[in-house]
Image: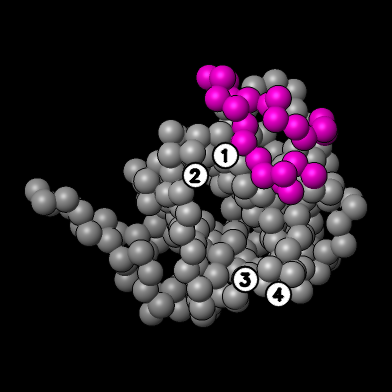
C-alpha cells in the first residue's frame, strides 16, 4: 500500500483506523507524505476530502465531544506538534458498538493519523504545553448543524488521561484539573452539552 500502513477497527469499532506514513530519515531531518489519495484507495479507504482545518490549543484544553447532525463528516486527524488524547464515540444507529469509544495519543513525535468515519462524535484533550492539531473533512462545516455530547458522560465512560479526581457524571464546571494542577479548559458550550441518552442522533 505504498507509503502507508493501516490498523483497522480500533477497539473492535468498525471503521476507526490509525494510518501511519513511511518516514524517510536522514541527517537533514525527515520527509513523509501526510496524504496520498492513491495509497488511501489502495487501502480501501474511499474518502474525498474537501476541507482542511488547523488549530492551536494550550494545555488542559478539552474540545468536544462534537458532531454534525445532518451533514456528518469523516475526519482524518493528526497532531503537528505537542501531544493530545483524541477520542471518537460511535453514534451510528444500529451499530453493534453504538455508544462505545476509542481513544489514543496523537503527537508530533508519533505522527499517527486517526481516521474517524461519518457517524462519530469527536473530541480531544491537550496534554502538552501547546499542541497544533489539523484535520481533513469530507464535508464542509455547517455552523447551524452542530451537535454535542458532554465530555464526562458516565454512560460513555471516557477515562481522560492525566485528569485528576472523580469526574464521570459530574456537573461540568471549571473546578476539574489535570494531575499537575493545570486547569481543565472547556468552552461554555462544551460545559453544557447533553448526555448521550438525551441526544437525537443522525
Give me the C-alpha separation between circle 3 and circle 2: 20 Å
The numbered mark, 3 or 4, whose residue comes first in the sequence reads: 4
Q: Quadrant of the C terminus?
A: bottom right
Tags 2 and 4 in contact by the CB under 8 Å rule?
Answer: no
Calculate the distance from the C-alpha at mark 3 to the C-alpha at mark 4.
8 Å
Which image quarter holds the N terminus?
bottom left
- Disc 3 element: loop
Nearer the N terminus, badge 3 or badge 2? 2
Give the farthest residue toward the front. 188
Pick the residue in front: 90 or 183. Answer: 183
Q: Which residue is mark 2?
A: 57
Q: CA distance from mark 1 to mark 4?
A: 26 Å
Q: Disc 2 vs disc 4: which is toward the camera?
A: 2
Magenta span of residues: 169-192
Q: Earlier in the sequence, mark 1 or mark 3?
A: 1
Q: Position of residue 118 (x, y in %)?
A: 66, 68
Q: For the point 9% across and 48% down, which residue is it?
A: 27
Q: Which mark is residue 141?
A: 3
Residue 79 visible to an observer of this rendering: yes
Q: Dot 2 lies on which element?
A: strand
Write down the residue under mark 4: 71
Q: Are marks 1 and 3 in contact (CB under 8 Å)?
A: no
Question: Do the residues bearing badges 2 and 1 touch, measured as CB atoms within 8 Å?
Answer: yes
Which dot marks residue 162?
none
Q: Nearer the viewer, residue 166 or 93?
A: 166
Specify the farthest residue to the right: 198
Give the Cα distance between marks 1 and 3. 21 Å
Q: Quadrant of residue 153?
A: top right
Give whichever of discs 1 and 4 has the lower sequence position.
Answer: 1
Label 2, label 1: how far apart the Cα atoms are: 6 Å
Q: Secondary structure at mark 4?
A: loop
Q: Which residue is mark 1?
A: 61
Amino acid at each position: 500500500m505504498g507509503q502507508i500502513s493501516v490498523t483497522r477497527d480500533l477497539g473492535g469499532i468498525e471503521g476507526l483506523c490509525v494510518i501511519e506514513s513511511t518516514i524517510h530519515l536522514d541527517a537533514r531531518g525527515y520527509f513523509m507524505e501526510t496524504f496520498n489519495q492513491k495509497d488511501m484507495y489502495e487501502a480501501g479507504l474511499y474518502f474525498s476530502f474537501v476541507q482542511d482545518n488547523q488549530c492551536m490549543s494550550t494545555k488542559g484544553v478539552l474540545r468536544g465531544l462534537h458532531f454534525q447532525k445532518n451533514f456528518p463528516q469523516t475526519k482524518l486527524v493528526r497532531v503537528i506538534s505537542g501531544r493530545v488524547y483524541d477520542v471518537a464515540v460511535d453514534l451510528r444507529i444500529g451499530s453493534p458498538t453504538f455508544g462505545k469509544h476509542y481513544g489514543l495519543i496523537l503527537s508530533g513525535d508519533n505522527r499517527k493519523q486517526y481516521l474517524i468515519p461519518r457517524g462519530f462524535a469527536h473530541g480531544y484533550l491537550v496534554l502538552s504545553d501547546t499542541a497544533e492539531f489539523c484535520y481533513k473533512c469530507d464535508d464542509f462545516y455547517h455552523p447551524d448543524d452542530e451537535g454535542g455530547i458532554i465530555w464526562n458522560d458516565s454512560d460513555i465512560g471516557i477515562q481522560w488521561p492525566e485528569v485528576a479526581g472523580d469526574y464521570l457524571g459530574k456537573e461540568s464546571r471549571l473546578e476539574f484539573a489535570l494531575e499537575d494542577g493545570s486547569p481543565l479548559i472547556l468552552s461554555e458550550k462544551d460545559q453544557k452539552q447533553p448526555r448521550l441518552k438525551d441526544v437525537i442522533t443522525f
